[in-house]
């Protein structure tokens, strides 16, 4: 029996090495990266998805364009953003990935899938590759480069430090590969999909891979709740209706007729009410407690 187990291990090791010798390039379409970015003293968060959308030519090189949709909040109701241009990236024929980030004039080297242990991945602070192993993605193994960069305020979803995975990018986020970390800030990659297949997953409970305006807006929640008066509504609200527990309309506002993004219901008696809003993405209703 021991001989059989030893033989199995001997046979498996070359197979694993063979899998990691197969290079997995960065995606060229239909990929999405779900990221959390923590910043500021108030514990502010950005929860967003970066996705590929079309190509562009900059200079003599062709790049894949990247956009983001998500939400940001800091001690208040979240604000949403959609289809926000974040930059573009390309991979050359030598396993190097370059990006022209938002507002940048020139490209920078983001990933080099040839890095060896001891190589510097970022100057200032000088992060280096500390070890190289492999990780099972789907049914195949991909190379993974560990660094001495840390996750800062974002935590690491269980990882001790920031790593780079072949064909996926940094576990700190796609474009914010190693540098977006600090005592009061940090970013972390929660998940990544390609062609609607989950390639990487660490904390996809925070992910919204739909990335469209409808998917984010339909996650709207009333803030504050319970409330003593003013509540907020999503952007592009066309109509809002507040009813009491008997179904009677106690407040109604229409676009163009004094409807604001914040409404005051301080005049209502304490109790349970239902707030319905209509947006271009659909209609949703939330329960609210008026104190």
Image: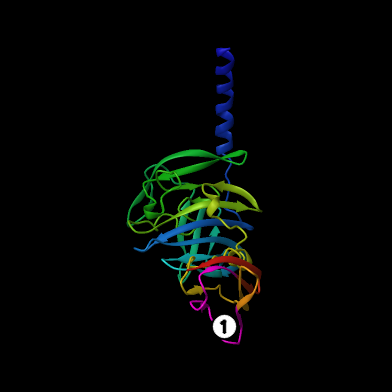
Where does the image place residue 208, in percent across and percent down from the top left? 58, 58
Q: Residues within 10 Å of mark 1 (few under 14, many from 20)?
A: some
Residue at (54% x, 81% y) in the render: 260
Residue 148: image location, x then y, percent = 36, 46
- Compared to residue 175, the image places residue 103 above or below, namely below
Q: Residue tagged by mark 1?
A: 259
Classify 179 as above or below 83: above
Which of the 4 image quadrants contains residue 182? bottom left
- Give the SS element for disc 1: loop
Front residue of 25 and 272: 272
Q: Across the whole image, how many numbered discs are drawn on residues?
A: 1
Q: Is residue 258 magenta?
A: yes
**Residue occupying the point 63% across, 78% down:** 239
Residue 189: where, in percent of width, then height? 49, 53
Residue at image position (60%, 54%) is: 27
Of 56 and 225, the residue lying toward us: 225
Q: How is the image coloured?
A: rainbow
236 and 5: which one is in front?
236
Q: Is residue 233 magenta?
A: no
Observer able to see residue 15? yes
Quarter of the image that includes the N terminus: top right
For residue 106, above or below residue 6: below
**Quarter holding residue 49:** bottom right
Residue 31: x and y in percent read 61, 56
- Horizontal side of residue 56 vs 108, given as left or right: right
Give the magenta range.
Answer: 251-274
Q: Is residue 95 visible?
A: no
């Amino acid at each position: 029996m021991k001989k059989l187990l030893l033989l199995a291990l001997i046979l498996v090791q070359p197979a694993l090495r063979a899998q990691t010798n197969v290079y997995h390039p960065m995606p060229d379409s239909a990929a999405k990266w779900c990221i959390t970015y923590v910043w500021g003293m108030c514990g502010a968060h950005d929860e967003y998805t970066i996705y590929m959308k079309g190509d562009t030519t900059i200079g003599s090189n062709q790049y894949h364009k990247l956009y983001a949709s998500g939400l940001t909040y800091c001690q208040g109701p979240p604000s949403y953003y959609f289809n926000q241009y974040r930059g573009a990236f390309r991979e050359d024929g030598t396993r190097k990935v370059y990006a022209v980030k938002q507002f940048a004039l020139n490209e920078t080297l983001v990933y080099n899938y040839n890095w060896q242990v001891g190589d510097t991945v970022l100057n200032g602070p000088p992060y280096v590759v500390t070890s190289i192993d492999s990780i099972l993605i789907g049914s195949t193994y991909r190379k993974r480069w560990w660094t001495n960069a840390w996750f800062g305020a974002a935590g690491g979803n269980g990882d001790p430090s920031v790593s780079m995975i072949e064909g996926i990018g940094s576990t700190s986020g796609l474009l914010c590969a190693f540098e977006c970390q600090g005592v009061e800030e940090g970013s972390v990659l929660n998940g990544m999909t390609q062609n609607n297949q989950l390639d990487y997953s660490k904390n996809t409970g925070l992910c919204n891979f739909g990335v469209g305006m409808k998917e984010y807006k339909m996650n709207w929640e009333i803030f504050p709740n319970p409330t003593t008066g003013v509540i907020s509504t999503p952007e592009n609200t066309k109509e809002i209706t507040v009813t009491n527990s008997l179904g009677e309309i106690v407040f109604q506002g229409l676009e163009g007729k004094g409807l604001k993004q914040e409404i005051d219901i301080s005049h209502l008696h304490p109790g349970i009410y239902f707030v319905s809003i209509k947006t271009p993405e659909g209609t949703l209703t939330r329960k609210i407690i008026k104190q």
